[in-house]
Image (spheres, coloured by chain):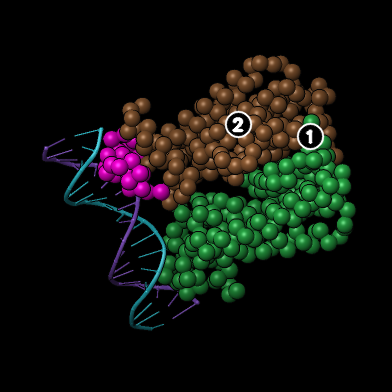
Chain colours: A brown, B green, C cyan, D purple
DNA sequence: GTCTATAATAAGATAGAC
DNA sequence: GTCTATCTTATTATAGAC
């Protein structure tokens, strides 16, 4: 990726996060890059292409991150803890991109939309399998696998909504709180 | 509220939910109502006025709902359970409005934005006070009150993202799952 | 690879007739 | 209370010079 292409991407992430995809114009982006709006089209075919490339890259990195974090163990509880922490960390470290990836899917063409939704489904399935396995092995209480997976994922994802990098708690501290909260919730339904 | 004013509101909720506020035009709304776009302005001063009135009404109803549900008990755990169920039920019953209320704040003028954010803060404070009180009384484990309150609220709120009214589980079943999950998470950090 | 210029279209909102 | 007509402005995107 060329220098200007990366700049356009990064400026777009800032603006899409702050104002939203539809409220951000190509002019806004060009302004932020210090170039003319026509120049954007040398690097990206369209505004939608720019959005898609951000979302696709983010989802791929997110999935890679999860796979790496699971490789270290084969114990269900430890894997769930690792998965939760990986998910939280990624969402807080790359707050703006993940926020966009969760809120701007409606800006995509239907083919691109399908691709991102599929990537997300595959990612979710990892968590669903862990909940299922934990339930069967008696490590977690029996429960509705899908609802619980959505609960866990959206819980951590939501962190990206309010997280402030210079705030009171570090990313690892927040990840630890979520980890404890979720494992307790999974182990027994009160 | 006149019949047409209510129709405009309801059509807008549908469209803002499906396409987003910025992606929805006054023409789209007028189309959905079977009137001309100029006629919208007889009922609402601007597109932003329409958004604000939806968000304000939704937040007020949400707060009323919570207050009613808390009146029945003065036991911390029971109150938290009631609060969680109230929150979940409202978000699933009025899925589209609450989704908009959580995703379209950027469409508001800064004065209107301030008003909605303040309403939300007051709402959150009820949950924070319950977590605090539960911690002091030893009903819940000690924990970070703010992080936990965000966790609980966004967890339930997120339900509005994926919930399908004709899906496998009823609203009360989902509320019960969340209730159990959250109380377990609050009682002990694993 | 970036520029100026412009096309083509759609937006939010208003004026004034009925 | 709704209409037609219109204003003003902004939008995405393209053409073609440099």
Q: Could you tell me which chain the residue with mark 2 belongs to?
A: A
Q: Which residues are magenta?
A: A24-46
**Disc 1 and disc 2 in contact, CB within 8 angstroms:** no
Look at 82% across and 50% down and name the residue there.
Answer: B133
**Picture layout, residue A157 above or below residue D1:** above
Look at 84% across and 47% down and name the residue there.
Answer: B136
Quarter assignment of residue B96: bottom right
Seen from the viewer's position, the closer of residues B156 and D14 is B156
Look at 75% across and 58% down and name the residue there.
Answer: B66
Left or right: where A99 falls relative to C4: right
Left or right: where D11 falls relative to A160: left
Seen from the viewer's position, the closer of residues B128 and A140 is B128
Query: Are discs 1 and 2 both within one chain?
Result: no
Left or right: where B171 falls relative to B18: right
- Give the CA separation, mark 1 to mark 2: 19 Å
Report the residue marked by disc 2: A89
Q: Residues within 10 Å of mark 1 (few under 14, many from 20)?
A: many
Can residue B172 be seen from the camera position used here?
A: no
Q: Secondary structure at mark 1?
A: loop
**Picture layout, residue B62 above or below residue A62:** below
Report the residue marked by disc 1: B189
Q: Give x and y (percent) for residue B187.
A: 83, 39
Left or right: where A180 falls relative to B14: right
Q: Give x and y (percent) for residue B165.
A: 68, 49
């Amino acid at each position: 990726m060329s220098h200007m292409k990366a700049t356009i991407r990064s400026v777009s992430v800032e603006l899409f996060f702050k104002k939203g995809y539809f409220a951000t114009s190509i002019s806004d982006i060009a302004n932020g890059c210090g170039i003319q709006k026509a120049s954007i089209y040398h690097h990206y075919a369209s505004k939608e292409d720019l959005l898609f490339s951000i979302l696709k890259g983010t989802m791929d990195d997110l999935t890679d991150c999860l796979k790496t974090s699971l490789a270290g163990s084969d114990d269900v509880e430890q894997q769930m803890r690792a998965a939760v922490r990986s998910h939280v960390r990624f969402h807080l470290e790359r707050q703006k991109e993940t926020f966009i990836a969760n809120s701007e899917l409606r800006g995509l063409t239907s083919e691109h939309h399908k691709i991102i939704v599929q990537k997300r489904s595959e990612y979710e399935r990892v968590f669903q399998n862990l909940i299922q396995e934990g339930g069967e092995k008696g490590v977690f209480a029996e429960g509705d696998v899908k609802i619980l997976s959505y609960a866990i994922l959206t819980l951590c994802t939501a962190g990206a909504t309010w997280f402030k990098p210079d705030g009171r708690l570090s990313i690892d501290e927040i990840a630890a709180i979520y980890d404890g909260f979720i494992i307790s919730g999974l182990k027994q339904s009160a």
